[in-house]
Image (cartoon, helix red, strand yellow):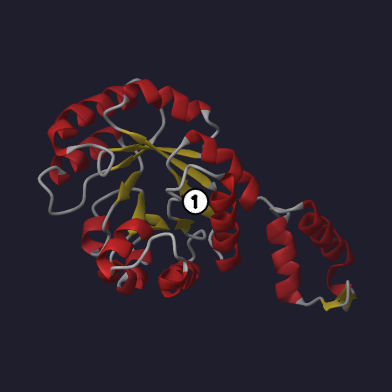
Amino acid sequence: MTAFLFVPGDRPDRFGKAVASGADVVIVDLEDAVAPAHKDAARAEVDAWLASGNPAMVRINAPGTPWFEADAALVAARDVPVMVPKAETPDVLAGFREVVALVETARGVESAGELAAVPSVTRLAFGSVDLAAELGVAPEDPEPFAYARSRLVIVSAAAGLAPPVDGVTTDLRTDERLEADVRYARRLGFGGKLCVHPRQVGFVKAGFAPSEAELDWARRVVTAGESASTVDGQMVDKPVLARARRLLGE
């Protein structure tokens, strides 16, 4: 799963459109996309959507907010995956069945290894916009977040989780920025990206898919097997063979 699409929890008219976008995961959002005055109404809309048998992940409001307990109760009652924002404390994540931990604070980055080790956590995601505000840096500049991103990749691998999901690209004016962000995230070892608009979904899915050149290389490596010492001048050993098999989905 590579494309995770947010849809505001108080916009039920968009729920079906989000599903039709082709996103691997639709995240109905009760947090940032919903104003405080609309939180309860949004929760009711999301509950009705889930009660009708529609699949979705729910981003609840952060622990410590006035809406956390009611949001958590909704997720438990409907038995759906949850995205927990401002993830910092393992004990909070352990209270859910299936969790994507959204790491978007300095404390969360430093606690990422502990978060990844929680049995209910299936994946980590990166919240660059909130972390940028805390650090006082520009969210569109990747350099200040190199450590945080790499940390999430490393701790995910160490915990046996799927590669983490990168944060949103807020610039909706051009495709070039989104494509550049996807290439950068994939290069660092991320395995997916959060989307804020349906039109981003196709770019994300294409960007994280192996290219034809990569697939061709992987097929030749697997065909050669461990009996070959080199392919395209590159030494082939067990780790190289394992990478080729991952690219082919084996």
Q: In this view, does 148 lie to the left or right of 163?
A: left
Q: Residue at x 88, y 79 (%)?
A: 229
Percent of width and height locating residue 183: 60, 58
Q: Toward the viewer: 26 or 93? A: 26
Number of on-image labels: 1
Alpha-carbon neighbours of circle 1 within 10 Å: few (<14), some, or many (≥20)?
Answer: many
Percent of width and height locating residue 232: 88, 71
Q: Residue at x 36, y 20 (%)?
A: 13
On screen, residue 131 above or below 203: below
On screen, residue 96 above or below 52: below
On screen, residue 73 above or below 239: above
- Disc 1: which residue: 193
On screen, residue 79 above or below 159: above
Quarter-wise, where is residue 138 in the image?
bottom left
Q: Residue furthest left?
A: 66
- Inspect this view and state whether residue 102 appears: no
Q: In this view, does 26 lie to the left or right of 95?
A: right
- Element assignment for label 1: strand
Q: In which quarter of the image is the C terminus?
A: bottom right
Percent of width and height locating residue 214: 77, 59
Q: Toward the viewer: 185 or 44? A: 185
Q: In this view, does 36 lie to the left or right of 135?
A: left
- Inspect this view and state whether residue 73 appears: yes
Percent of width and height locating residue 230: 88, 76
Q: What residue type is labelled 1?
A: Lys
Q: Which residue is drawn at 54% across and 40% down?
A: 201
